[in-house]
Amino acid sequence: MKVPAERRFAIGVDYGTNSVRALIVDVNSGAEIATYVSDYRSGDAGVLLDPVDPNLARQNPADYIEGFYAAVGETVAAACNVPGFVPQNVVGIGVDTTGSTPIPVDRDGVALALHPEFADNLAAHAWLWKDHTSYAEAAEISAAAESHPHGYLSKCGGTYSSEWYWSKILHCRRTAPEVFEAAHSWVELADFIPGFITGNTNPRTLRRGICAAGHKAMYNDAWGGLPEESFLASLDPKLAEIRGRYAPKAMPANRKAGELTAEVASRVGLPAGVPVAVGAFDAHMGGVGAGIKPGTLVKIIGTSTCDMMVAPMDQDMPDIPGLCGIVPGSIIPGMYGLEAGQSAVGDIFNWFASHLAPAEFAGSGDLHSGLTAAAETLRPGESGLLALDWNNGNRTVLVDPRLTGLLVGQTLHTTAPEIYRALVEGTAFGALTIINRFEEFGIRVQEVVNCGGIAEKNPFVLQIYADVCNRPMMVSRSAQTCALGAAIFGAVVGGAHESVEAAQEMMTAVRDEVFEPRPDAASIYGELFALYTQLHDGFGGAARDAGSDTGARPGDPSATADLGNVMKDLIIIREKVRRG
């Protein structure tokens, strides 16, 4: 009788905005064996805030380290109760994180915030992805890069963001010089964790991932890696020094960052020497965990969204304005990785439910359930409302953190469920804007696979997305696609699969349920999207930058958009829908 082969496993570690999750999966089937979530202990749901500056969002690096021990340790302990699992059969570990979340570190790669003298200094902690304090520096970098012969912004949408690596470092230099001077280097969280658990924390030699470097630090092989020292020095001479303390070659996540140290291994119940993959961002690994391939748009829908696509390297790839990067190897090695996204989606719903929704919708204690139940009874266009989804700025396609939310069409009869639905619709219109931008530049979206907390839990949202985008919405089989994607890279560096694509074939799938667009709803949403586009271009500056038929030049304040029809057109749509 043939003896069955021993099962092999990989671990994915997923660092989110509020917690870290570990997941153990079978490398042959993608079956999820055990998982555990460890919440960050510091701040407000893990985020360090400043009541004076709403743009500030930092995190305590100690939470990342303790979170790894807790999440991985508890997951391994739980898996040990599953028949067939033994820690010695873990072939590899992958890590994904938020980003850009750079951490100021000392010469040994220790986070400055772990030193007692910096523990209470917010600038010495990790600068979370959604920290927008460096909007002025981002604009300065954009202006300087626009005229540079290398076209540093050509591969990241034409505009540098306040959420990204260099703008945050430059802002620290100007606002917290004591931290900047103490920092030997700055390390992305996606690089920090693999470096820590493998014992290679030296900023000059630890493996830097192409995902973080290419999408957030203007790294590209076309100009030799990071921007030239002379360019960075033109912004501030000290930035050139930071460049010199960065590994010269960034690596894709199918490369090994190192092996698990004995000290870390003993804390989490694993053998020493387990291979650890180079780190990447959560959305990019989430794309892999959702089965991304050419023609597939993967939407990771949570507090914000990231929209991921890949394209073959032999395909002509135009520079696409407003994207967060076109980076070879950042998602699947050997393919272009394309990233877009929205700065707030779930955060918008939570803001309304937490601060403005009447308590009567709480029901059993969940305001979202009460609001959703009431909003589902409404028809598209019935409320006469239209929202812009910019409560946390605009990531794609305008790349402007100083844009804000807007709700048009309110009357004395407007209800909370109507507003809630309009906010959901606004995020769906933002999603369609991103799809249109891809397709305008020849990147065809053949199918959409959704994942993340909202995709898992809220069919109401997905149905609206299907109706607004007028295309089917699929959902990834795994509820933990980011961690699964990380585990896939762990399986690859551990030798269980020859390539990421081979691992995806065996470890990923979508659910049977598909949200199909409803023709009548899609028709009304087509009319509303035209009005959304007017608001988007008018308030976002796109109409002004395009000039006007009055002969005004792009950027001329006199070239303002005419929005006088929007309110009345919303009323016309509202009355048409209510009449049936």
Image: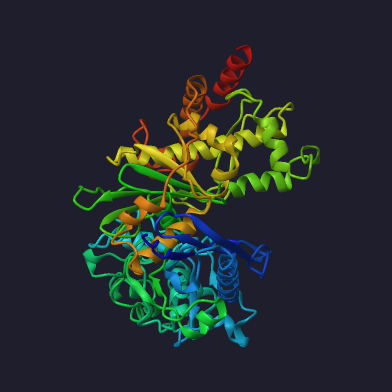
Quarter holding the C terminus is top right
- Left or right for 515, reference 549: right
Furthest residue toward top: 579
Name the spot of residue 294 as percent of width and height, x first. 30, 45
Q: Nearer the viewer, residue 275 or 443?
A: 275
Residue at the spot 28% in from the left edge and 54% down from the top edge = 336
The quarter of the picture where residue 368 lies is top right
- Left or right for 18, reference 263: right
- Left or right for 191, reference 377: left
The quarter of the picture where residue 352 lies is top right
Q: Nearer the viewer, residue 471 or 145?
A: 471
Is 422 situated above or below 28? above
Name the spot of residue 375 as percent of width and height, x first. 66, 31
- Left or right for 265, reference 280: right
Is 264 situated above or below 555? below
Residue 2 can be seen in this image = yes
Residue at the spot 38% in from the left edge and 70% down from the top edge = 278
Is 167 situated above or below 298? below
Residue at the spot 41% in from the left edge and 39% down from the top edge = 448
Is 110 situated above or below 193? below
The quarter of the picture where residue 490 lies is bottom left
Name the spot of residue 273 as percent of width and height, x first. 41, 80
